[in-house]
Image: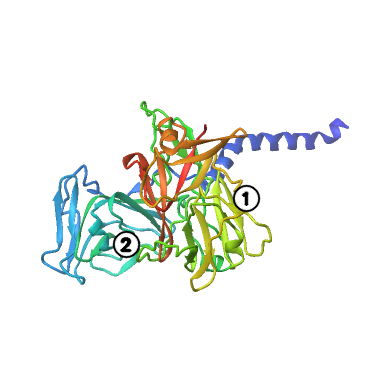
Amino acid sequence: MLRKNLPLYILVVLTLAALLFLSPKIIGIISADSEVPATGTELLTNNHFDQETFNSQTWSMASANQNSGVAPSTGAINIACGQSEGDYVKIAQVAPTIAGKFYKLGITYVAESATTGIKAQFGFLKDSATANVIESKPIDITAGSTSFTTYAAPKLNHENSFFFFKCTGKNSIKVTGFSVEQYSVKPVAMVTVSTASLATATSSPIKPTTISATTTSTSPAATATATRAISTATSTPVVSSTAAAPVQSTTAQTQLITPTPIGNLQTMQSGWNIFGSGSDVSSQVFTTAGMTAMQMFAGKWTKIVPSSKKEMILSSQGGIYVFNPSKSTKNVTLTEPTTNSALIAGKGWNILYNSSNTETSIDDLKYNFSSSGKSDSYSIGDLINQNHASKIVYLLKQTSAGVGLTRIDITQTNKIPAKTGFWFYLFSL
């Protein structure tokens, strides 16, 4: 019997040996489609104005007014957008784009409160600083020292394309740096939300990438990095390439919208909304009006759709995503439920909410967190200072185009704006 089946046994042994030899390569091929490098390839030069002087030979400039332009200042470049509404300033630099590649566009800037009246955009031009636009992304300018990141995926090759930044209006803005990183694999933070999926409310806001603490010598991805406050800086949390990232609205963001309750009346615009309440709210407030309501605690979504007959008590500690499928705004009346919410924050991502009418110190913002079946109240500041939570948070803003994200190091300001939801990552307790 053994001699009769010997050729079969030999074939099996050889097959197993081949699989053992090739498995690392097979895994490598599979991983190539899922792993995302911590950083992409930077295409710009002379782009860190907080470290180097602006070079007019590297950058091209165009303006609609002789008084508009770019002037180097300490640690930044001051861009005077114009003297009137029709004025503009545009600066550009060669940055070839390739179909099938993905590009992360970033800007860091300092803006006074009055500066937020300007309109700004960046993206790619076809083959010169004055050529037609290939792709353009609006920049949500907010007061203070902050950054803005978005993504692009050109459909055609443009070997001579230019990156550009353009601002219009009567004001100036100080820019400390630009960035254009090229990726061969779609970055985890690059999420496309289709109009069709929103119309049926089957798509939902996607949580930021999962963060784990490991020792690494490389920089974690800037799109969703959470860094523990460790003085030795030997442990840097890195981003998991398998998790999804927060949705960044890719449609034009015009004016900011701050939903204002009139008594217990709350207005929901068409599409996605983010808001919170100083008290718990019944999900039926939204579902009976044909809207979907969602909250994120301990890395898990709680989602209640209009067809659901189940009532969920939404927590006053968290921000609430609401999807209004109608093309018009809807008013809902907020009423306090008869029972308290069972939802509680925990390890992983949480969408929390500052219900105060004023910006609040992170040391004064306290929330209930659960660990190992027990819950207790902790301040955001204490959790960060004790290395239990990430200092990187994502502020959520309601705009006329939906919900926008702003990534910040909260230890730089130590405050969360009034009536604001934010993504917060808890490592452990």
The mark closer to the camera, 2 or 1, is: 1
Q: Is residue 28 rendered to the left or right of residue 409? A: right
Mark 2–mark 1 CB contact (< 8 Å): no
In which quarter of the view is residue 401 placed?
A: bottom left
Badge 1 is on which residue? Answer: 339
Give how far across and how far down residue 24 sits, in percent: 57, 37
Q: Amino acid at mark 1?
A: Thr
Give how far across and how far down residue 128 sits, in percent: 24, 64
Q: Residue furthest top?
A: 232
Give how far across and how far down residue 383 sits, in percent: 45, 34
In the picture shown, does residue 89 fall above or below 393?
below
Q: Nearer the viewer, residue 206 or 129?
A: 206
Q: Amino acid at mark 2?
A: Phe
Label ID, residue 278: none
Q: Residue furthest bottom?
A: 328
Tag 1 secondary structure: loop
Disc 2 from disc 1: Cα separation: 53 Å
Q: Is residue 135 rendered to the left or right of residue 313? A: left
Is residue 29 in view? yes
Crowding near the residue tagged with mark 2, few <14, some 14–19, many ≥20 C-alpha atoms within 10 Å: many
Sequence-wise first label, 2 or 1: 2
Residue at point 41% right, 45% down? 393
Residue at point 53% right, 72% down? 326
In the picture shown, does residue 31 fall above or below 384?
below
Badge 2 is on which residue? Answer: 124
Q: Nearer the viewer, residue 330 or 188?
A: 330
Is residue 202 in view? no
